[in-house]
Image (cartoon, helix red, strand yellow):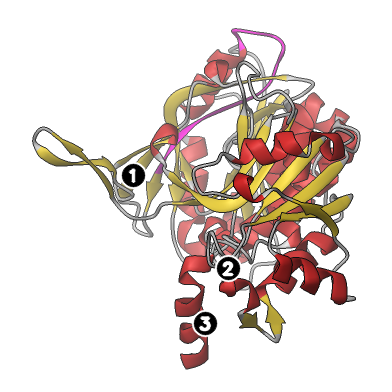
Amino acid sequence: MNDVLVTVYIVNFNYLKYIEQAIQSVLSQSYKKIEIIIIDDCSTDGSQDFLRRYHDYPNIRVVFNTKNLGLTKVNNIAIKLSSGQYIMRLDADDYLDPNAIKILLEKFSENSEYAMVFGNWYNVDKEGNILSEERRFNIEDVELLDMPAHGACTMFKTGVLRRINGYDESIKKQDGYDIWLKLIFDHKVANVQIPIFYYRIHGNSLSSNRESLLESRHELFKKHAPRLNSKIKVAALLTIRNSEIEPNEVLYEEYENKTLLEVIVQNLAAAEQIDKIFIATSDKRVIDLVKKSPDFDLNILLRPKELEYLHVDLQSTLDYFKVQMRQYDAVLLRSLQSPFVSSTHIDAAVNYMRIFKVDEVIAVVPEDDSMYSYSTKGMTRVFDPNSKLRREGDQLYRKVPGFKLCSRIADSKVHEWRIGNVILDELSAITDQNFKLFKKWTKSN
């Protein structure tokens, strides 16, 4: 592939401090047949004066936007201007390994059906010091393609991006995930397990705002689920043990003038993907409250008390009510253990199941602290969030109790059961056990 033209476009907005290193990393590539398109998105830090010096470079085109358009619109401008058979975005605060283009093209040469190829990367600080290396799984071994390629420094066939109409300009974040969902079910993708670029971590990095990214990801699930799969019929089953077996007074605790029971039910009712809400309990107090309150639109299932003992598996409850659940494609199991899971997360779980066709979706939060296990030599660290080597499979996640979306409920012995996940924000992950501490903290702040 020594004769194909590659377009590298550099997106800049107020990155005067870093833009020269980004440009030079492209000019220094071992593969030379490259056109560079630099698009300045109306910078105000002097970047435009600096970039004018590249006007006379034969293989560089500099574009100055007259107003700030945002990343996805700039991406589409670059696709329209591109003359290359392959195209890749480089953000102005990042920079490439000298062999990045060569390595990606060599991977493309292995299979003419590849539409995109991506690699690993180094995380660096503001000064360019390496903080860690990010290593992805070999995509050929991955069955559940729910982890997208990095939005930057992923190489595409330009024609493929044009055929799928490029980037959705209504999306402000997670543009890489949007393209990923457009491609992975109809095209072949590949990766190289070599670091090919340097990703700068600083206060302005998009990835620094986890909650905002989660919201954007959920919007993408909502957008793509109808395109990739038909709607599935979902029942929510809220299970509450009898207070004689397990104290459930937390249900009547109030948060923002609502009991936790009301919080749970209202989030279920607000979820667009839930078709019907059931409550399974033998607790007369709960049943009376549900019957009397006009705020509860629930279908009561009287659960035998013997199914509510702590040692009894929840599958027994599902089996007992299998007639009521049979008409549904999936059942969302909810309990008071995680009262704040929002309707957004509920819809995201259902849309995730529709997109990736998994058997189960659980709610999780990433562990950000070091984790240890006991060994013959004492405590051994099994996860270090500050490790210099950050492998995709090393990240640990804590399951949030009281939330599980299951398909094919009647068949609990399905082989190769596939489990997906939705990541919760801080509030949604609060459990009933730490609610009182949380309530005390919010009052004091």
Left or right position of 291 against 438: right
What whole-number distance in Å separates the C-alpha atoms at marks 1 and 3?
Answer: 37 Å
Give x and y (percent) for residue 299.
86, 56
* Part of the protein shown in magenta: 109-122
**Reading the chain from its start, which is encountered first: label 2 or label 3?**
2
Under tag 2, what secondary structure?
loop
Q: How far apart are marks 2 and 3 (CA)?
A: 17 Å
> What predominant SS class does the magenta segment belong to?
strand
Q: Which residue is drawn at 78% across and 39% down?
A: 321
Check contact, mark 2 vs mark 3: CB within 8 A. Answer: no
Q: What element carries label 3?
A: helix
Q: Where is residue 440 in the image (x, y as percent from the top left)?
A: 47, 85
Which label lies toward us, 1 or 2? 2
In which quarter of the view is residue 427 placed?
bottom right
Disc marking residue 248: 2
Q: Residue 439 carries which label?
A: 3
